[in-house]
Amino acid sequence: MTPAARVQTAIEILDRIAAAAREGGAPADAIFAEAMRARRFAGSKDRRAIRALVYDAIRAVRSAPASGRAAMLALVEAQPGLAALFDGSTYGPAPIAADEPRARTGVAAEALIDLFDPLVSEAEQGAMLTRAPLDLRANRIKASRDDMARLFPEGASIPGAPDGWRLPPETAAAQHPAHADGAFEVQDAASQYAAAALDVAPGQAIVDLCAGGGGKTLAIASLTGNDADILACDINRARLQQLPPRAERAGATRIETRLLNPGREETMLADWRGRADRVFVDAPCSGSGTWRRSPELRWRLTPARLERHLADQKKLIDLGADLVAPGGKLLYAVCSIIAREGRAQVDEFLNRHRGWTADADYLPDGIGRAAGAGFLLTPAQDGCDGFFLARLTSPC
């Protein structure tokens, strides 16, 4: 492909990504992969170049653009050399008109920035869109961080994460044979901090209420040395089905999965009511803390979608609280830097549930900043995804 044809292809892919963002369609990675399958003539260099153009444009543009061309023209402002590729050639984009509209650039729309936790200053917002490193978590059942250092000598330890090992962005660690053997999982440091903050121990009964594909479930199993009864739940069958083979690979043999029917969660968890030593509620959220990995999420968030997330979070934290044994603990977490999903949600929970208390001092030194009754982690301050978490103790 010519450089101009790469730009035109990126524009067409951006058109589809912008439409999917507005309509709640497929994520950008899936759209890009499908587009490349349809262009089998594109070589590996073409694919890398097109991907870079697409994601550079997504990072540059603050909200869903009117068109992929408008997004690419915004990128021209940051990369002026691209202008010459709008040459009107057979497979290239049409020449740029002097008055042609460009998408607006920035971290996010002002209305969205206004929702950020007060701790997220303007000075640190740019770090939310930088390329994220690849973080690994050694599986204690089979390996240690020292093993990660031997396998990946180009990496470095992660501050405050005893099992964590950090590699450069886009390292193909998941293709290493040790991954297939269950020695490690790819997991951002923020998720590792959250799993550790649950304060699990061997012999406990533990519920991961929003397990998804099971990343944090496996982290909990690792932290307990495969010596705790863990119930992993979700309402998404496709995601939950990923956990059993991952658990087998990891040697985590004491995990039970339970698919919950929406609206019937309380009934389907009646046998666990009041008996869990620990409950993890990694609630669905805006994903605003993960923009480094999925920058198009800022194109997707609408007031209506945020309200749905807030309602789900309230429902799940209350459901989780019902499962906790007297004196047990609940960890509420969201990969978000929006105050309503973090500190405000926990404040409201504590007002509804008298006798519950918020714990303190459960994160490693230098990690996280106090945000109401919980803690906020951000890429600029903590070198990990944006995350809010709060550990809550039930009355005895």
Image (cartoon, grey):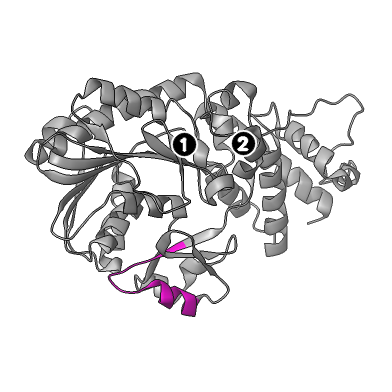
Q: Real-space Cα distance between discs 2 and 1? A: 25 Å
- Residue 177 location, x and y as percent? 43, 76
| Residue 359 on the magenta span | no
Segment colored magenta: 136-151
Graded by Cα atoms within 10 Å as few (under 14), some (14 to 19) or many (20 or more), the crowding at tag 2 reads some
Q: How many marks?
A: 2
Q: Label 2 amino acid?
A: Arg
Residue that carries the numbered disc 2 in the rendered image: 16
Q: Tell me the residue that label 1 is attached to.
A: 336
Question: Residue at point 83% right, 49% down?
Answer: 4
- Kindly state the secondary structure of the residue where label 2 is placed: helix
Q: What kind of residue is marked 1? A: Ser
Rendered image quadrant of residue 314: top left
Q: Residue at x 45, y 24 (%)?
A: 305
Tell me the quadrant of the picture where the N terminus can be found.
bottom right
Residue 38, above or below 227: above
Q: Are marks 2 and 1 in contact (CB under 8 Å)?
A: no
Instruction: Indicate the quadrant containing the C terminus: top left, top right, bottom left or bottom right.
Output: top left
Quadrant of the rendered structure where residue 144 is?
bottom left
